[in-house]
């Protein structure tokens, strides 16, 4: 998995919607890529700041706010 794929899957992961073949790849990348680990940390911090837990699912509004925040973080890396 590369960083772009990670970024595409991060909301699915937070929704607990990753399939069983993607999930270990996602976790592998999270464990070995410090850039994405940092982004993921920013992502979960954003969710906490919004006061919205990832389960059972993100609203479309929250998802788009997160994606915007995530892309902003990526640009700063
Ligand atoms: Zn990465």
Image (spheres, rainbow, N blue to C red):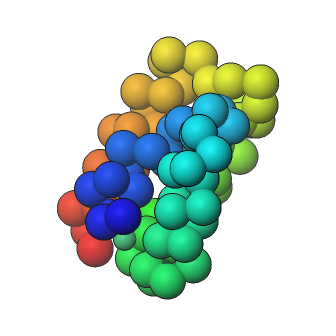
* Residue placed most toward the observer, 5 or 74: 5
* Residue 39 visible in the picture: yes
Q: Please name the residue shown 33% across and 53% down the image.
A: 5
Q: Is residue 60 above or below residue 35?
A: above
Residue 34 % position (x, y): 45, 82
* Left-right relation of 67 to 47: left
* Residue placed most toward the observer, 66 or 22: 22
Quadrant position of ligand 1: bottom left
Q: Is residue 60 above or below residue 21?
A: above
Q: What residue occupies the far top of the structure in this picture?
A: 60
Residue 69 % position (x, y): 39, 46
Q: Please name the residue shown 62% across and 33% down the image.
A: 17
* Left-right relation of 69 to 25: left
* Residue 49 visible in the picture: no
Q: What residue occupies the far left of the structure in this picture?
A: 75
Image quadrant containing the N terminus: bottom left
Q: Please name the residue shown 43% across and 80% down the image.
A: 33
Q: Determine the image quadrant of residue 76.
A: bottom left
Residue 47 % position (x, y): 64, 42
Q: Is residue 39 above or below residue 77?
A: above
Image quadrant containing the C terminus: bottom left
Q: What residue occupies the far front of the structure in this picture?
A: 21
* Residue placed most toward the observer, 57 or 72: 57
* Residue placed most toward the observer, 18 or 11: 18
Q: Is residue 61 above or below residue 13?
A: above
């Amino acid at each position: 998995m590369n960083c772009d794929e990670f970024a595409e899957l991060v909301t699915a992961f937070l929704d607990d919607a990753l399939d069983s073949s993607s999930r270990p790849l996602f976790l592998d990348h999270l464990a070995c890529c410090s850039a994405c680990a940092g982004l993921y940390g920013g992502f979960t911090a954003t969710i906490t700041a919004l006061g919205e837990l990832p389960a059972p699912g993100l609203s479309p509004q929250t998802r788009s706010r997160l994606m915007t925040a995530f892309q902003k973080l990526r640009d700063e890396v």
